[in-house]
Amino acid sequence: MGYEVVIGLETHVELSTNSKIFCSCGGHSSPKEPNDCVCPACSGMPGMLPVMNKRVVELAVTAGLMLNCEISRYTTFDKKNYYYPDLPCAYQITQLNHPICTNGLVTVKTANGARDIRIKQIHMEEDAGKLVHEGKFSFVDFNRTSVPLIEIVTQPDFRSAEEVLAYLNKLKSMFRAGNISECEEGAMRCDVNISVRKEGSDEFGVRTEIKNMSSFEAIDKAIRFEAQRHIDALEFETEELVQETRRFDDVTGKTFAMRNKETEADYRYFPDANLMPIIIDDEWLEQIKAAKPVEVDERAEEYRAEGISDKEIEILLDNSKAAKLLDDVIALGCNAKDSAAWILTDCAGILRKDGQSLNELNISAEKLAAIIKMVANGDVNRNSGKKILIAVVEDDVDPVKYCDEQGFAKKVDSSAVESVIDKVLSENTKAIEDYKNGKEKAKQALFGACMKELKGAGDPALIRTLLDNKLQNI
Ligand code: ADP
Ligand code: MG
Ligand code: ZN
């Protein structure tokens, strides 16, 4: 029996703000030399107070909107206490009790299809500084202390490294498009929580957390290594799994234990009384929504790659019903570009005539695909295809049967067209005479009579050429 890997991610993203989260020092991309963006507040001098950067709230809310989260209208900060030389206050300002966004959902696409990943929450917090080790000395650089971060926490919904990478790539392209973060390496860091369980089991196994990885390649390798370590431990009892924090070593490609997993109590969280609760009212939320950029939809890119025009893509992204129909007929083997034209031009046109919109389109993908294929294969011409489409859209007829009944299906070769023209000419001697006397309209009437005789199934250009030839020779 196989094992299933279960993964939950905590992703830290450094925001592209001009200044830090609680002081006016330059933000993420400002520093040139160590400690050149530091002030008494962000270096933890006694008595300094934090002042909230409004832009951080706006970017966090924008990220939440992109990830379909509920936006908290009341959000507060807490102190997470621990001692480390890169944390000058000996606490990190973060959000525990009232995070800014909760309950989101993001769909990721992998080779095995689409998967929904639930977002547990997004919270705002400040980054820590950096330690630089040189020989027996260690240096501390406070440029990064108080750079704003959002942390995005997922539910344990990933089942493979592929899904994790698809998710991270999606976050990256969304956040770049939204000017939330450039997400360059180091600006996006993940803690990967991982466990395995027997396939079919609905209980989670013991989880370990691999901390602080920023290269996607390392994340991929670490997940594969750690999943195998868990499976071996369970299958062959190579070791006992304990809940712990681990680090991934790039050189050996292995993870190793760092420390036992700390619990919430270890951090002595308490509300940060130096910062007022933030209230997000309707007006502010509407402003943030209005400023949110249009997402670069992977879907749009796929359509574009198929040769579908920007105008059509716009309609498709706006109209999920039309988009679904298009996806379905493509899945049935139709050409994407052609099918888009059939739906957005032909179907829309028929509905418009009846005073309806594309939303009211009620045609099965199978019937539409049958028509598109008949035309694409040359079994009927596009004109006849359109007539069949009208009958299907308006009366839901069976396209193949209808085509047979109307006699559209027969291949109309030039000899068949010729005999029809001969017949029409022999029945319309008056019109021929008129034409010879200079009446152009008479030729149009003859052409119409031929089309009618062929029930619209003939190629109009061919009919015109043959008709012209015959008239010349009379
Ligand atoms: P903690 O407070 O200990 O960090 P959370 O409940 O916040 O725990 O979860 C942290 C992350 O661990 C989340 O992304 C969650 O999805 C993930 N996670 C929780 N349980 C498991 C598990 N059994 N296997 C894998 N990931 C898990
Ligand atoms: Mg956690
Ligand atoms: Zn500062």
Image: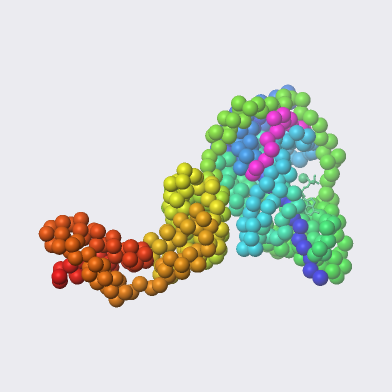
Residue nearest the observer in this picture, 129 or 308 = 308
Q: Which residues are magenta?
A: 67-79
The residue sitting at 81% across, 63% down in the picture is: 200
Quick check: 288 left or right of 432?
Answer: right
Image x and y of residue 90, in percent: 77, 35
Number of numbered discs present? 0
The residue sitting at 22% across, 64% down in the picture is: 428
Image x and y of residue 426, in percent: 22, 69
What sort of colour scheme is used for the picture?
Answer: rainbow
Image x and y of residue 255, in percent: 75, 59
Q: Quadrant of the N terminus?
A: bottom right
Inspect the magenta stretch and tell me whether residue 52 lies in it. Answer: no
Quick check: 265 left or right of 9?
Answer: right
Image x and y of residue 308, in percent: 45, 55
Quick check: 114 left or right of 274?
Answer: left
Residue 326 in view (yes/no) = no
